[in-house]
Structure formats: structure tokens, C-alpha cells
Image: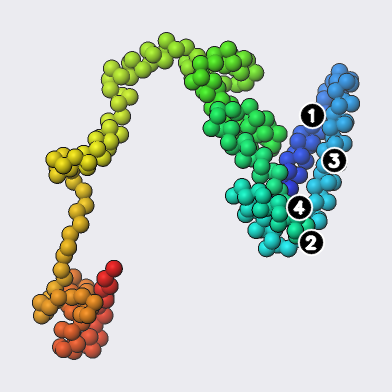
Amino acid sequence: MDLSIILEFKKINIIKNTRRTIDKLILLRSQNKLSNYKEKLVKLKELINKNIDEIEHLNFLIKNRNTYDVSMFYIIEFLNINQCFYTSEMLSKKYKITSDIQFYKEIYSLLDKLHTDDFLDILKFMKDYKSLFKPSNIQQIKNDYFLSLCHSSKFKNCLSFIRNNNIDKKLLIYLNENLMKTREMILNAFGISSFRLQKRIEYGIMSFKTKHCSKEVPYNHIEHSLILCKGSGDLINHENSGYAFKNGNVYGEKYLQDNNILDEGTNPRKLYFM
């Protein structure tokens, strides 16, 4: 299992999807509706057989991985996770190890598309592995894709996407530019969109860079302080270590030794200088 986590998840996903298909067929049969889907039954049979073949192939790969050097497999896996694919391929070839490199390449290629607002491939991927994701996860991606279309003013695409997907009605406001302007106008009238705390922090950071304003801004000042022994008044430093007692007083090591205080069963905390 340790060497075949991704393969196991792929197998689980196929099994769940196949079971879901079979459950639908059983339901249709119980309702005497199976005859209405004769054309689709042939395709469903081909799909189920294909899934069975794929499961058997995954079982073969999982069994074969048990012969691999575990440490080397983990090294190659680490390289794949960090997108060092060239080095991963070289090591896999040298040690005759089949890794999950294609899976990682696909994942990172999809994640890169998030920065370009291209969510369709990501949606397809999540639907292919929907047994591993929560419905709310897939719905969130749909909402994000819808919003990206709105921000790009691709309203025709928005309408087309809405017809085929369940989009939260609250998000439909983004389709109407005038409504958005009205919304911003009302919020701005009350200063709601000014983000007062954010502005206050921004102005505070800016004031650090000015000579006069920075004097009034509270922040930590670096102080050069000296610690003196409570008993003798001598300077406490690396040569004369300090010891702090429970009452808060600090005494120098020389003073404590001269007065035999450390030998009386006391347990002060020694101070260290950084």
C-alpha cells in the first residue's frame, strides 16, 4: 500500500464508479425500464468490461511494486512531488522502477491552469475522480469558473455554463454590470468597502518610512541595557554569569560564590546571553 497509494486510489475510484453504474442497472431492472435502454446497455457493458481490465492491470502494477527498493521509490516519489521529472525519469530507468510520474505531470499541469482561469479541464478531472471528492468541492470549482467568466465579461459563456450547471443564484448578480455598480455605490456610501482596518495598517506601515510620522508610531525599540548584580552591583556578563531567583532578583555568580549562597540548596535559573 505504501508504494501504491495513488494506484489504490485509482482502483477505488474505478470500483466505486462501476458499482454506481451496476446499481443504476439493477434499479432500472427492478422498475422494468431496462428495455428502454437497449442501445446504452451495449456501451455500458463495454464500459464495465473496460473497468474490469483496468482494475486487473492496476492489481498487477501494485503487486509488482512490492519488489521495488522502498528507499529508492520514496526518493523518486519525492522528485515527482517537487516536479523534478527529468531526474525522476533517469533514476526510474536506472533502477527499473515504474513511478506515478504521469499522474504528477497531469496534476501540476491542471494546477497551473488555475492561474489562467481555465477550469474546464480541472472540472473534468474532478468528475473523473468524483468518488474521491466531495460534491461541495466540485461545486466550488464550478462557482470559481463562473466568476472567472464574469470578471472576463464573457457573459455568453456564463449563460451557456449556467444552463448545464447548478450555480448559486446569489452569484448571478455578476452577470449584470449595472447591478454590480449599484451594489458598490451603496457600499461606498457607507464606507463599507474602504476596509478601515486594512487602511489603518497600510498608513501605519507607510509612516515608518517618514521621519516625523514614525516618531509617533508605537513599535518595539532596540535598547542597550546592562544587568547589575543585586548584591554587589557588579556587571553581569559572560565572565560573571547571572542567576535569577523566584522573587525576580538577579545576582552575579561571583557574589553567590563569595557568600556561599549557591551551596545552601537554592535553585535559581541561570541566565544566558544571546
Cα distance, mark 4 to mark 3?
A: 22 Å
Where does the image place residue 50, in percent across and percent down from the top left? 85, 36
Cα distance, mark 1 to mark 2?
A: 39 Å
The answer to whether the residue labelled 4 contacts the one labelled 3, judged by CB atoms less than 8 Å apart, is no
Disc number lying in front (1 or 3): 3
Disc number lying in front (2 or 3): 2
Element type where label 1 sits in the image: helix
Cα distance, mark 1 to mark 3?
A: 18 Å
In terms of sequence position, does the residue under pointer 4 or pointer 1 come before the other? 1
Which image quadrant: the C terminus?
Answer: bottom left
Task: Indicate the amino acid at tag 2.
Answer: Thr
In terms of sequence position, does the residue under pointer 4 or pointer 3 come before the other? 3
* Residue named by callout 3: 52
Q: Which residue is drawn at 10% across and 80% down?
A: 232
Where does the image place residue 263, in percent across and percent down from the top left? 23, 89
Mark 3 Cα shell of 10 Å, populated few (<14), some (14-19), many (≥20): some
* Residue named by callout 2: 67
Which label is found at residue 24?
1
Residue nearer the viewer, 160 or 152: 152
Task: Residue lying at the far top in this picture: please name it.
Answer: 178
* Residue named by callout 4: 98
Disc number lying in front (1 or 2): 2
Which label is found at residue 132?
none
